[in-house]
Amino acid sequence: MLFILDAELSDPPSSRTCFRDVTLYASVFGGFDVLVECTPDQLDFYWVWLKQGGAMDFVSQLVRFGEESGYTVRKDFGGDLNLERLNESTINTVVSAIRKSNRWELI
């Protein structure tokens, strides 16, 4: 199953560290293939941004919006879970959503 994160959730005021933690939980504990979605003109920018911050360790690939379907976490609207920002105060919401997917194997 695919877990798709909006790349904008790695931009300030969101936390790139929390973004990486979510990809770790989804990949390792949730058993998801993690994709990051953005607009075509931002693919290179986000690849460098996430790579420099160590946030690509558990990301399978970057894709264009709407290119793949799966469980989506998006900024503002249009996802299965919508967040204004991803930081220390919202990370538990995302981890809970991963756990509720019934794919959490190591509890």
Image: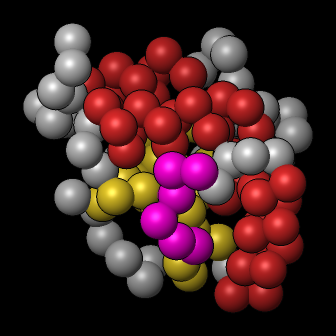
Q: Which residues are magenta?
A: 57-62
Q: Position of residue 74 (x, y in %)?
A: 54, 51
Seen in the image, is 29 located left or right of residue 104? right
Q: Is residue 58 magenta?
A: yes
Seen in the image, is 36 located left or right of residue 4? right
Residue 100 appears in the rendering: no
Quarter location, residue 14: top right
Q: Quadrant of the C terminus?
A: top left
Q: Residue at x 55, y 63 (%)?
A: 36
Q: Is residue 33 magenta?
A: no
Quarter location, residue 64: bottom right
Q: Nearer the viewer, residue 76 or 51?
A: 51
Q: Position of residue 16 (x, y in %)?
A: 76, 39
Image position of 66 with respect to 14: above or below: below
Q: Give the mark count.
A: 0
Q: Nearer the viewer, residue 27 or 87?
A: 27
Q: Residue at x 16, y 27 (%)?
A: 105
Q: Position of residue 24 (x, y in %)?
A: 48, 37
Q: Quadrant of the N terminus?
A: bottom left
Seen in the image, is 72 located left or right of residue 19? left
Image position of 90 with respect to 43: above or below: above
Q: Residue at x 29, y 50 (%)?
A: 32
